[in-house]
Image: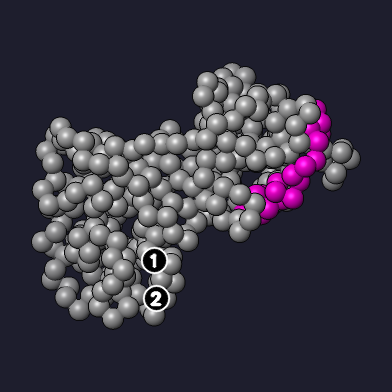
Amino acid sequence: MAKLAVAGVAFFVVLLLLIGGGAIAVVQAVVGSSVQSTSCVPGGATGTPVAGYGAGEMGHAATIVAVGKQMNVPEKGWVIAITTAITESRLRNLSYGDRDSIGLFQQRPSQGWGSVAQIVNPNYSSEQFYRHLTALPNWQTMPVAEAAQTVQRSGFPDRYAQFEPAARQIVAAVHGATCTSSGTGGCNAIQAPTPAAKAAITYACRQRGLPYVWGGNGPDGGHDGFDCSGLTKAAYDSAGVLLPRTAHTQFHAGPRVPDGQPLLPGDLVFYGAPARIHHVGLYIGNGKMINAPTFGQPVQIDDHRRPGDDYAGATRPTG
């Protein structure tokens, strides 16, 4: 509930993809109309470059793996996804294909995979692939090529197996990726991965301009404004997700977002030491949070990271 300094600077991240001994290039996922976009710094390289795949392709592979981690898909699922993307597009985000097939996985809008704008977003197309994969009974016991074909229903089912070795090598090269994700970063056209997260952000956005009040729970709680944890609690209460009252107890209530995993809109971001968390904000994407900062500062949108801050980590409230 305590104060947060309000000096802000733009947050800029330069990402270098390191495969083996060489810096290959900047890696950044294509920004589309999905829930978020992800930028990844692949790590955990095997020491051997992956022949035939450049910075763009490896960046897409890192994003596919990052989305799989975010969705708690086991490693075999990453291999299946990368095998499929190599087979379908050679890990290129294509704007063309057979009939209306497009994107990394050559998904078809006419077959219910999403709109063109959605499918050309690597995050969205990866998420859709994993959702179809994990809906298959016993997918984890299927051979990689069989699982890929069952999802894709390709007219050329024998193509997948030949790319499995390359997929395993690529997964080994990018599995340690450090990623950041973003949504809109604002209160217009709010995007979030779950209905609860969207409801919480929507509520918090409607409180902008209300004053900072120590111990404040907002108009519904009999106060003119909010303090930091009063805002986050009220936001998630509106979504049917009950949080503890203080920033410190909210932090320890979890569940924690693992270090290096992408933040998603709706995550709670915390400041202080684990033994004394003193501030919390609601992450809304694109490096931004909505929060009740301190005395004299109303509920507003701020950068969630600043030079010299005492960022402690994030949690992802669930119903």
Residue that appears at 52% across and 35% down: 10
Marking on residue 47 = none
Q: 10 Å neighbourhood of mark 1: few (<14), some, or many (≥20)? A: many
The magenta stretch spans which residues?
198-216
Disc 2 versus disc 1: distance between alpha carbons? Answer: 8 Å
Indicate the position of residue 54 as horizontal and vertical percent values.
Answer: 19, 49
Which residue is labeled 2 in the image? Answer: 109
The secondary element bearing badge 2 is classed as helix
Residue that appears at 29% across and 37% down: 16
Q: Is residue 119 visible?
A: yes
Indicate the position of residue 295 as horizontal and vertical percent values.
Answer: 78, 26
Q: Is residue 201 magenta?
A: yes
Task: Give 125 or 77, whichever is nearer the viewer.
Answer: 125
- Residue furthest to the front: 9
Q: Earlier in the sequence, mark 2 or mark 1?
A: 2
Residue that appears at 32% across and 52% down: 64
Q: How is the image coloured?
A: one colour
Quadrant of the image containing the N terminus: top right
Task: Give 280 or 71, whichever is nearer the viewer.
Answer: 280
The secondary element bearing badge 1 is classed as helix
- Would you say the residues marked 2 and 1 are in contact, meaning their CB atoms lie under 8 Å apart? yes
Q: Is residue 134 visible?
A: no
Which residue is labeled 1 in the image? Answer: 119
Hey, which quadrant is residue 48 in on the image?
Answer: top left
Side of 91 relative to 221 (left or right) = left
Q: Amino acid at mark 2?
A: Pro
Q: Is residue 307 above or below residue 166?
A: above
Residue that appears at 36% across and 36% down: 14
Q: 10 Å neighbourhood of mark 2: few (<14), some, or many (≥20)? A: some
Side of 2 relative to 128 (left or right) = right
